[in-house]
Amino acid sequence: MIGLIVNLISFRLLMAGAKESLNVKGAYLEVFSDMLGSVGVIVAAIIIFTTGWRYADPLIGAAIGLFILPRTWKLMGQALRILMEVAPPGLDVDEVEARIRALPGIADVHDLHIWTVTSGLDTASGHVVLADDAELHAILDRVTTLLAEEYQVTHTTIECEPASHEEHVNPI
């Protein structure tokens, strides 16, 4: 019973942060499963004590495991996306590249990468080839503003290259 009370307190403390941080969400799900386990033990004990039916304990344990499994699977998928440096869900990198390329003063875009570093922090890096008459600061401002306002990518590293710079051409 004391374990259940501690789990309920921990559950309430972690609830708000679980929406913002993958780490807190993992802790939240761990406490949630512990809390369900505590409730399951209490319910199984009552059933066994009042009816003598000993299958209550393994059945309740299996039900809790099956209830937690999809949440764990979803958390694992989110963590794997971060580890694999995959683009944020719903973000099409080719579309973003086309939008950047369409900005005035940009001749080309290459090596654009967008990924999630941690919960709530998407980042981008890439190279922008400037048109001959383009002003570097204005281009950089346009690109970072586009990424922040339309795609919520606020941590960016954009390298601006003059069109005459041949290094941006892929040799292969």
Image (cartoon, grey):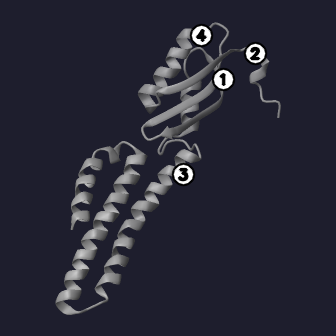
Measure how far apart labels 1 and 4 are at the Cα level.
Answer: 14 Å
Residue 95: percent from left, percent from top: 55, 35
Name the amino acid type tagged 2. Answer: His
Q: Circle 4 — which element?
A: helix
Q: Relative to residue 45, is residue 124 drawn left or right?
A: right
Residue to which mark 3 is pinned: 80
Name the amino acid type tagged 1. Answer: Asp
Measuring 37% from the left and 59% from the top, which residue is drawn there? Answer: 30
Residue 70: percent from left, percent from top: 41, 64
Q: Circle 3 — which element?
A: helix
Residue lying farthest to the right in this orientation: 171
Name the amino acid type tagged 3. Answer: Leu
Name the amino acid type tagged 4. Answer: Leu
Lower position in the chain sequence, tag 3 or tag 4: 3
Lower position in the chain sequence, tag 1 or tag 3: 3
Lower position in the chain sequence, tag 1 or tag 2: 1
Circle 3 Cα neighbour tier, 10 Å, few/some/many (<14 / 14–19 / ≥20): few
Q: Indicate whether 61 appears above or below 133.
A: below
Disc 3 or disc 2, which is closer to the eye? 3
Q: Of residues 30 and 87, which is closer to you in this image?
A: 30
Measuring 76% from the left and 15% from the top, which residue is drawn there? Answer: 165
Lower position in the chain sequence, tag 1 or tag 4: 1
Residue to which mark 1 is pinned: 108
Measure how far apart labels 4 and 2 are at the Cα level.
Answer: 14 Å
Give the number of the disc on residue 92.
Answer: none
Measuring 29% from the left and 67% from the top, which residue is drawn there? Answer: 36
Q: Of residues 48 and 22, which is closer to you in this image?
A: 48
Residue to which mark 4 is pinned: 136
Residue to which mark 2 is pinned: 165
Lower position in the chain sequence, tag 3 or tag 2: 3
Circle 2 Cα neighbour tier, 10 Å, few/some/many (<14 / 14–19 / ≥20): few
